[in-house]
Image (tube, rainbow, N blue to C red):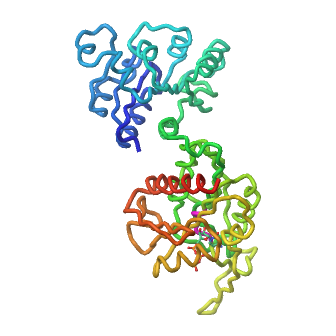
Amino acid sequence: MLKEKTILLGVTGGIAAYKAVELLRLYVKAGAEVFVVMTKGACEFVTPLTFQTLSGNPVHTELFNLYQEREIGHISLADRADLVVVAPATANIIGKVAGGLADDLLSTTLMATKAPVLFVPAMNVNMYENPLYQANQKKLEEFGYHFVEPVTGYLACGWEGKGKMPEPLAVFEETLRLLSPQDLSGETVLVTAGPTREELDPVRYLSNYSSGKMGYAIARAARQRGARVILVSGPTALPVPCGVEVVQVVSARQMREAVMERLAKATVVVKAAAVADYRPAERSEQKIKKGQEAELGLTLEKTTDILAELGQCKTTQLLVGFAAETTDLVENARKKLETKNLDLIVANDVSRSDAGFDVDTNAVRLLYRDGSSEELPLLSKDEVAQQLLDRIVRLRCTTA
Ligand code: CTP
């Protein structure tokens, strides 16, 4: 996701410096080249050796160090970055930059760079709420610097309040957003994900193996590319994606209501959820007790096909469905595309062990309304999401 991107990671002296180590790992794993600049204070919390080992690049700590300056000078660091991330960012570094000061390697590099800069503030709640700090942040935002909001919680100094550095994954996602083309800005993408659960009684339900990974990947990728994203999710174990409006539902009926209520706001709908086709005709209020019978019959009734209903009532929305198949992939998917009145369907052979439910990869075939189709190779679900959004952007351009 970050191949061919160079990130300059500035680490300043706060207890959250340990989280910058995990952030660095996420960047490196995503393919980025990362150079780390540490302030003197940061070196009191984590050693440069940790960052050097994980980044595979020399760590820079001093402005007037002949060896470091010859190896790769501060101007060169500033020039080669696609993005500068300062995490954690103390009140001190933010104050310095807001005041136009450049008295150490990091503040000098920040002064010299033309790359976008993302600050991840982390500090004591009283420092964060101090009007001087707030004025500095506001000033920097007005100059185009980006910020990730700190989170509220128990702070290392013993106080409760706003000032904690968000989890590295949240910062990583914001990084992806800043480095992505904003080709979905202005769009509102409504995504459904995960399974539904249809209750038999208070302790039992019917469901399926969907993990929600594909739908969540689409929601994250759409947000990275500038869309407003509404994610209607069945029960999953996945973390809520940052910057996405999440509506948690359980049953097919609740999913239908949640989707229909929000349809008018959407310009694109992607239905990746594995919705139950049938639910128990009756839900017992009490736990069903074991009887003397050797067999127990279950009467099921059909749920509403949400996607088919969307196909009937949609106005200008681009409608994308998924087809989970174990046989006759293309024929079955094409039938669904036509009967449900879709613009695009993602055909998924869920009998494969490396595609479909609950794995991190997917192999799909995309079928279009005009009869054409294309096969994507085996990819991570994040990559499938990006490729699908490329097609959605193209279709939106041709229909807009
Ligand atoms: N879908 C839906 N509401 C349902 C059932 C399915 O919105 N009650 C949507 C799914 O989200 C998916 C598409 O329809 O985008 C196809 O779902 P799939 O399970 O592959 O097929 P079905 O239409 O349910 O048909 P079948 O189970 O017979 O293959």
Question: Left or right: where does residue 333 sit relative to residue 58?
Answer: right
Question: Left or right: where does residue 162 sit relative to residue 49?
Answer: right
Residue 272 counted in the magenta span: yes
Q: Where is residue 131 in the image (x, y as percent from the top left)?
A: 67, 14
Q: Residue at x 38, y 70 (%)?
A: 353
State the count of labels.
0
Q: Please, is residue 381 above or below residue 112 in the view?
A: below
Q: Position of residue 67 (x, y in %)?
A: 22, 13
Q: Nearer the viewer, residue 179 or 13?
A: 179
Magenta stretch, residue numbers: 271-275
Q: Residue at x 45, y 73 (%)?
A: 349
Residue 125 counted in the magenta span: no
Q: Nearer the viewer, residue 247 or 222?
A: 222
Q: Please, is residue 382 above or below residue 100 in the view?
A: below
Q: Position of residue 98 (x, y in %)?
A: 56, 12
Q: Which residue is drawn at 34% across and 27% down?
A: 35
Quarter of the image for the N terminus: give it: top left
Q: Position of residue 362 (x, y in %)?
A: 42, 63
Question: Left or right: where does residue 309 sit relative to residue 54?
Answer: right
- Which quarter of the frame holds ligand 1? bottom right
Q: Residue at x 52, y 79 (%)?
A: 332
Q: Please, is residue 58 above or below residue 349 in the view?
A: above
Q: Is the magenta stretch mostly helix, strand or loop?
A: loop
